[in-house]
Amino acid sequence: MSKLVDEETRIAALGDIRKAIEVAGEIGELDIIEGADPDLEMGALYELSLQKPVPPVLLFRKIKGYPDNHRVVVNTRASRVFNGGIGLDLVRSFRKGKRKSSEPIPPVHVETGPVMENVLTGNQVNILAFPAPKWHAGDGGQYIGTECMVITKDPDGDWVNSGTYRVSVRDERTLSIFIEPGKHADIIRKKYWARGEHCPMVISVGQAPALGAVSAQTFPENVTEFAAAGGRIGRAIELVKGKITGIPFPNDCELVYEGFMPSPEELTMIEGPFGEWPGYYAATGPEPVLQVKAIYHRDDPIMTASPPARPTFPGTYFGTAGSALMRAASLWDELEAAGVPGVKGVFKMPGGGSRFINVIAIEQMHAGHAKMAGLVAIGCGSASYLGRITIIVDDDIDITNPAEVMWAVGTRWDPKTATDIIDGMWTGYIDPMLLPERREREDLTNSRIIIYAVRPFAWKDSFPKVNQIPKEYSEEIARKWAGKVSFLDK
Ligand SMILES: Cc1cc2nc3c(=O)[nH]c(=O)nc-3n(C[C@H](O)[C@H](O)[C@H](O)COP(=O)(O)O)c2cc1C
Ligand SMILES: [Mn+2]
């Protein structure tokens, strides 16, 4: 982890967006940008920042056309406030059992909080008053929600779910939300619709980094993301209830919308297209909308944003806002929970974003071990949606280095005998390779390949030895010849 920020400060920043921005300033990782145009200019500046492997926090204020103190912040979670480098240690630090306080802490209900500084209802509701950037030229709308929380409550129980799903502005009182079929808010909203009711919903578009993180992460059904966030910051998230729907939301959110979502039979609007993280415009079509009945906001709200960019920018190697790293950690947790032994590392290959290319290093223990890891990886909860390639390698491979992974594929993989291709897996509309006939039939499935690039277990001990000067000897020789052989000093 970064040596710049101590653990206590980091946890405080994780629980408070304003603190996170302050810390970014203190360590020289904050750029305050005044006067940028929300129509494409902010998006271009953001994408430029992703050329840095660990991008700085960009805080936009005095946004053209909006009140000076309505601010937008990007890169908070991807910044050096939370990430010190780009190795496997970072993945480890995101893992469940490896955190200081990994036990969930249930949220508590309180009467009020800063989010109630302004309560707007009835004719006061005007979504257009808040800066909603058009991030990319091809976008069919202004997207106010990219690092947001869409909060719904199971009508059959206590489960309150928070998921990040993109949100765009339709008009003064209407928001579009794109929720892939099968995501938790989709499962919950359908329960209301089956009863002939509109789905009550709350959307926060500015909140603590910990809340953004858990909302983008896949937890099992019936698990409340707020409890997971509480565990990470070591204190209960404080919730207030929406005055119209009773749906709870954190009391220090920056800007919150509350309303109802009628069923698609009753009302839809065209959503998208939107420049998506795989690097394309794939999903667009009629989607249900949120009819906003109330807005709550702090006096000088900060909208958190994490607009998608193609996963070839260095800043996205952990996925936009750190998702690749987080999803690698979740996959690692789930492999172990499923009983796969000897997992030494899990990483997401640069270029594949947070989902397309999994790489798993194992210390092979028995026949069929690699297959066990591969099949669990493509089927488990956190990696099932929208995958493509899973590569299993031996643990002598540095899986954070794509050249090493490709070396294993090139030299330890027999395509004919060491491959599984499995069809009918869960994908979504944003998959650019969703086959056209499947897209038309709403058959949101794709196929996966598992590449077993490991020394075959049965003859691994007689597998050709690796040709490399041992690291210790190499270092010893480098020391010995330093100052005498010029390339060694360069
Ligand atoms: C920046 C960002 C944007 C996202 N946008 C969407 C989206 O528009 N639609 C969607 O279904 N999932 C989106 N996701 C993925 C979901 O947040 C993720 O699958 C999460 O697990 C959803 O919560 P749930 O598991 O409670 O359904 C996004 C993730 C991130 C990090
Ligand atoms: Mn969930």
Image: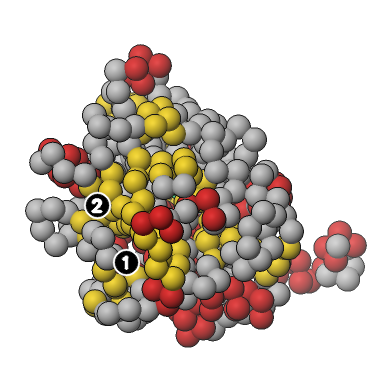
Q: Position of residue 445 (x, y in %)?
A: 31, 27
| 27 relative to 465, above or below | below
Q: Residue 200: which numbered mark, if any?
A: 2
Q: Quadrant of the N terminus?
A: bottom right
Query: In the rendered structure, which amino acid carries the disc numbered 2?
Result: Pro
Q: Horizontally, is 483 left or right of 272 in the view?
A: right
Disc 2 packing (10 Å; few <14; some 14–19; many ≥20): many
Q: Residue 173: which numbered mark, if any?
A: none
Disc 1 packing (10 Å; few <14; some 14–19; many ≥20): many
Residue ID for mark 1: 249
Q: Quadrant of the C terminus?
A: bottom right
| 360 relative to 287, above or below | below
Can the viewer see residue 352? no
Residue at horizontal 31 percent and vertical 41 percent from the top: 384
Query: In the rendered structure, which amino acid carries the disc numbered 1?
Result: Phe
| 119 relative to 264, above or below | below
Q: Position of residue 323 (x, y in %)?
A: 46, 54
Between 384 and 47, the residue placed more toward the observer is 47
Element at badge 2? strand
Can the viewer see residue 251? yes
Q: Position of residue 487 (x, y in %)?
A: 86, 59
Between 84 and 16, the residue placed more toward the observer is 16
Element at badge 1? strand
Residue at horizontal 66 percent and vertical 66 percent from the top: 68
Which quarter of the figure has residue 406? top right
Residue at horizontal 34 percent and vertical 45 percent from the top: 290
| 89 relative to 16, above or below | above
